[in-house]
Image (cartoon, grey):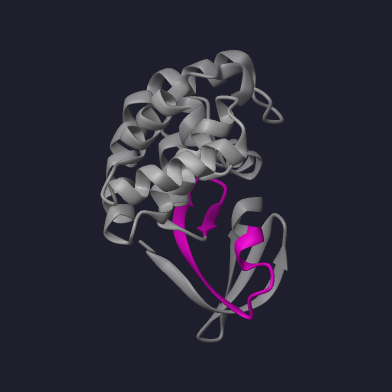
Amino acid sequence: MYEYIQGPVAELAPAYAVIDAGGVGYFLNISLQTYSEIENAASAKLYVHYVVREDAQLLYGFASKRERELFRLLISVSGVGGNTARMILSTYSTSELQNIIATGNAVLLKNVKGLGLKTAQKIIVELNGKMLDLSDVESGVAAASGGNEVYDEALAALMMLGFAKAASEKTLRQIVKESPAISVEDAVRDALKRL
């Protein structure tokens, strides 16, 4: 129903934002990730997910379409509601979450407050293939914008795998310089061979 809401930030807290759009204040539930993106902004544009329940109508706001898409994937898993998905996105950045799911790291995912091991495993099983689809879309966008996002995501993946940041950065800079249109997946594979 709503794609995004844009306007002055009337009120802001780590769990919600009130955006004044044309004289109407919209209360949006947000993650800590979105909070940090708009923390010092006078106005903001938040992508919206609208939920209608028997007892409530809720708006969830996200600083990026990518975060919103991850939220929608998370709530598609049986047993994961809006607040749990928001908690997951508050604990991990979008790239970290994609890497956790892609590598099947349920132990790391269950570190989210209120999330048990079984639910974490269920999220990984149900979303593993969908993360690749999301990565392909993001890689295309990143390649068109010069590859910075590919670099960031690949660096996050390597660091989660335990590689030193300095060595990973040096290797990835070289890889992106050699192949500006490389995908995140290929950049990580190439870096693993070189490190």
Toward which corner of the image does residue 108 lie, by quadrant? top right
Q: Which residues are magenta?
A: 35-62
Give coordinates of residue 21: x percent, y percent.
Answer: 51, 80
Question: Within the magenta stretch, is there residue 150?
Answer: no
How many marks on residues? 0
Front residue of 113/174: it is 174
174 with respect to 11 (left or right): left
Question: Within the magenta stretch, is there residue 61?
Answer: yes
What residue lies at 45% left-to-right and 60% top-to-bottom? 48
What residue lies at 69% left-to-right and 54% top-to-bottom? 15
Give coordinates of residue 160: x percent, y percent.
Answer: 57, 29
Front residue of 107/8: it is 107
What residue lies at 45% left-to-right and 54% top-to-bottom? 49
The image shows residue 107, relative to residue 129, as above or below, that is above
97 with respect to 107 (left or right): left
What residue lies at 42% left-to-right and 67% top-to-bottom? 4
Toward which corner of the image does residue 70 lie, by quadrant? top left
The image shows residue 190, relative to residue 35, as above or below, that is above
**One can see residue 31 in this view:** no
Give coordinates of residue 157: x percent, y percent.
Answer: 50, 33
**One can see residue 38 in this view:** yes
Front residue of 110/50: it is 110
The image shows residue 17, relative to residue 127, as above or below, that is below
Query: In what quadrant of the picture does the N terminus appear?
Result: bottom left
Give coordinates of residue 154: x percent, y percent.
Answer: 45, 39
Residue at the top extreme, as displayed? 118
12 with respect to 20 (left or right): right
